Image (tube, rainbow, N blue to C red):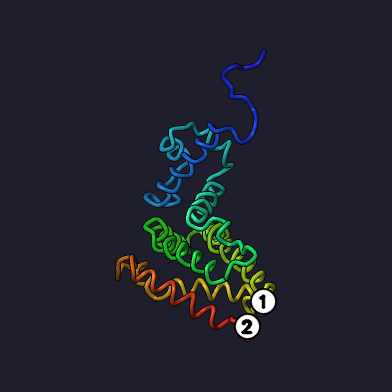
Amino acid sequence: MPNKLLPASGPGRPKDLIKRQAILEAAKSLFLSLGYDGSSMDAIAAEAGVSKLTVYSHFTDKETLFSAAVKAKCQEQLPELFFDLAQGTPIEAVLLNIGHGFHTLINSRESVEMHRLMVAQACQNPKLSQMFYEAGPQRLLDEMARLLSKAGQAGQLRIDDASRAADQFFSLIKGGANFRLLIGCTSPPQGEAAEQHVEAAVGMFVRAYRPD
């Protein structure tokens, strides 16, 4: 006799998506406020308003949940669509969109707190640091490298090493202001100052890689 209390099977059900999002939001909140070690799966389940079994049904362990939370944060600000180069679209316009999104992401409160957490965890849990890097920074670098390769093939840029160029692009957008923000020496760049910084960085990048 089937158990009528169990939900019907099948991926992609709206209730499942809502619960998954609630778990991710709870995980991001607790990881930032309590740290990785201080955030138990029980606490995350309680914060999300679901059972621990539900958390494990979506994420097999805490490391997987942490990685998913980092990836979700990046995708909120920089969805994969940002890295698409449609035919006839100037690369400058695409890079400006990415630059503004990335600048907002790295200077957000959540991102700053997460980076500080990872620095604090670096010596204690290098595996966690690797997971963070692969879920966040490495994914963005890979997406950017693919975009720059396409721009090179389309003749919009002259790119010999797409991975190196991707690293240079994000470094330009970060600038010194992000480091000062991480160590608490300044407030996040906003408004016209942020706009000008991103536009100047994109302009420099395009001039450096513009075809002869």
3D distance between C-alphas at marks 1 and 2: 7 Å
Would residue 15 appear left or right of 145 to someone viewing this image? left
User: Whole-percent x and y of residue 183?
Assistant: 34, 69
The amino acid on which the numbered mark 2 sits, given as a three-letter code, is Pro
The C terminus is located in which quarter?
A: bottom right
Q: Nearer the viewer, residue 53 or 26?
A: 26
Above/below status of 51 relative to 3: below
Q: Residue at x 52, y 60 (%)?
A: 129
Determine whether the residue tagged by mark 1 lies in a helix, strand or loop.
Answer: loop
Where is residue 144, by image quadrant? Answer: bottom right
User: Whole-percent x and y of residue 176?
Assistant: 39, 76
Whether tag 1 and tag 2 are in contact, CB under 8 A, the answer is: yes
Q: Residue furthest bottom?
A: 212
On residue 155, the disc is 1
User: Mark 2 Cα within 10 Å, few/some/many (few <14, many 20+)?
Assistant: few
Would residue 188 appear left or right of 164 to someone viewing this image? left
Q: Nearer the viewer, residue 57 or 61?
A: 57
User: Whole-percent x and y of residue 54?
Assistant: 53, 33
Where is residue 58, by image quadrant? Answer: top right
Circle 2 residue: 211
For the question of whether residue 87 can be seen, the reply is yes
